[in-house]
Image: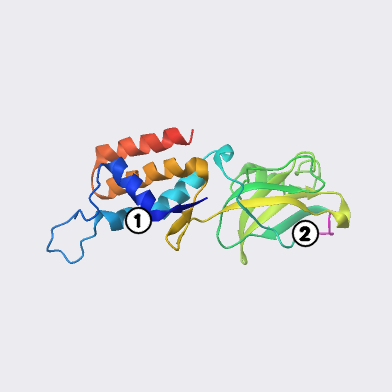
């Protein structure tokens, strides 16, 4: 859902008990002084990224589709496949190939011991259509989703593939998962309080944000 950034800033100021949009944080004679309004806006995308990365999957929205083409390690439709991820990829929502019995909502990375198992020569050790595994890795072409594995042959296809994009402000709005909007407000307040030296307030805002994504 797209949220108006000015409205988000108003809610963040309320959380911080700062409703004057022109409050100065440094001495009025300092040409590098930033207003509270500017500092709040500068923290919104960071807060949104952190909250969307760490929230449980059931709080995510449907996300955006990806996966225009598939590469295969060996034969088409057999074994491991891979997909080049969009440049704005932040987090996987769901991924399923047509011959899989279920979708995967949590991807592993190259540091996970389970990833090493996917490189085994023994098929029974790797992910399979009944117990699939998805990994996000970094390759020379960028981020890649590797999936293990398929057995249906050349007619296999992507059944569903959705992701959460990197949050950014565009035309005065920002796209957030609806169930995470309040957590983003309080985590932004936490980052603002932290940057302005209000440690007690920062702790309070962080605790509220954490509760909202449990």
Asked whether the viewer can see residue 131, the reply is: yes
Left/right placement of residue 185 relative to residue 85 reads left
- Residue pointed to by mark 1: 41
Asked whether the viewer can see residue 191, the reply is: no
Compare marks 2 and 1 and give the one earlier in the sequence: 1
Magenta residues? 71-77
- Residue 96 position, x and y percent, is 73, 47
Left/right placement of residue 110 relative to residue 149 reads left
- Residue pointed to by mark 2: 73
Q: Main secondary structure of the magenta part?
A: loop
Q: Secondary structure at mark 2?
A: loop
Q: Secondary structure at mark 1?
A: helix
The local crowd at label 2, few if under 14, some if 14 to 19, many if 20 or more residues have their Cα within 10 Å, is few
Residue at 30% in and 49% down: 192
Residue at 25% in and 47% down: 19
- Residue 210 position, x and y percent, is 42, 36
> Where is residue 22, by image quadrant?
bottom left
Residue at 20% in and 53% down: 23
- Residue 106 position, x and y percent, is 63, 43
């Amino acid at each position: 859902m797209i949220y108006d950034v000015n409205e988000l800033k108003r809610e963040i100021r309320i959380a911080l008990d700062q409703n004057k949009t022109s409050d100065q944080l440094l001495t009025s004679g300092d040409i590098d002084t930033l207003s509270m309004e500017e500092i709040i806006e500068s923290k919104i995308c960071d807060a949104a990224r952190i909250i969307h990365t760490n929230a449980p999957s059931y709080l995510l929205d449907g996300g955006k589709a990806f996966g225009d083409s598939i590469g295969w390690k060996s034969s088409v439709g057999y074994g491991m496949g891979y997909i080049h991820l969009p440049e704005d990829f932040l987090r996987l929502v769901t991924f399923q190939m047509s011959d899989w019995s279920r979708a995967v909502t949590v991807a592993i990375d190259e540091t996970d011991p389970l990833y090493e198992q996917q490189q085994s020569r023994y098929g029974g050790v790797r992910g399979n259509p009944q117990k699939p595994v998805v990994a996000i890795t970094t390759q020379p072409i960028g981020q890649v989703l590797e999936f293990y594995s398929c057995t249906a042959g050349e007619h296999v296809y992507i059944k569903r593939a959705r992701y959460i994009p990197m949050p950014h402000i565009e035309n005065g709005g920002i796209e957030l998962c609806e169930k995470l909007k309040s957590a983003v407000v309080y985590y932004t307040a936490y980052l603002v309080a932290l940057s302005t030296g209000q440690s007690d307030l920062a702790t309070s805002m962080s605790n509220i944000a954490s509760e909202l994504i449990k």
